Amino acid sequence: MARHNLEERAEKTLRDTESYRVPVPIHLVAQRLNLTLEATALGEKVSGMLVVQGNQGAIGYNSAHPRVRQRFTISHEIAHYLLHARRSGKAQLFIDKQVTFRRDESSSAGVNSEEIEANQLGAALLMPRGLVQQGVQRQDLDLDDSEAIDLLAKAFQVSTAAMSNRLQNLKMLAYGN
Ligand SMILES: [Zn+2]
């Protein structure tokens, strides 16, 4: 799915679930999509998982991870549910290992196209374009200022790295890259 469609999909999902606000209540988004949530001991290497059967599913996320990380995981699993889960037939399982950023591991998150899409939609759900732009304008943030990015990250309850990444991607959009 093209990136601008993912942006629209994110905004629509948040509006449909009455969750279009800062910080995005990602637990509520999951609930309203018929996804149950459970913090669970998943071991070091797994961030989260999603089980889907028909029109409902369950997300498990690593109970040992920091809260911002858990929010990112939940959002990523919601994205898999919206984009990649079949709605009928046998139960489906998605398991997300820790992102390693190593290009030579074709199975790791961020490498195959479903993972890239889930990361993009996941980021757009937690940091919807419209609300990020409003946040930047309202507070007259200077985006070269790392403290400003930190503040914005805190407001959205995401990591500074995630917000920084998102701002870069949104700038690319604005300038048509
Ligand atoms: Zn994934």
Image (cartoon, rainbow, N blue to C red):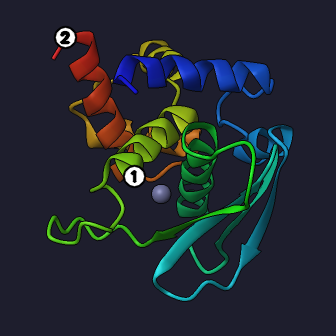
Q: Which mark is residue 83?
A: none
- Which residue is nearer to you in this view: 15 or 134? 15
Residue 90 lies, with reference to residue 114, above or below; the image says below
Instruction: Kindly report which numbered mark, 1 or 2, lies closer to the viewer in this rendering.
Output: 1
Q: Is mark 1 within 8 Å of ligand 1?
A: yes
Do tag 1 and tag 2 residues touch (Cβ < 8 Å)?
no
Residue, far bottom = 43
Please give left or right for residue 56 compared with residue 102 in the image: right
Q: Which residue is mark 1?
A: 115
Q: Which residue is mark 2?
A: 175
The amino acid sitting under disc 2 is: Tyr
**Mark 1 to mark 2: distance in Å?**
25 Å
Q: Position of residue 27 (x, y in %)?
A: 76, 48
The amino acid sitting under disc 1 is: Glu
- Which residue is nearer to you in this view: 117 or 146? 117
Q: Position of residue 128 (x, y in %)?
A: 53, 26
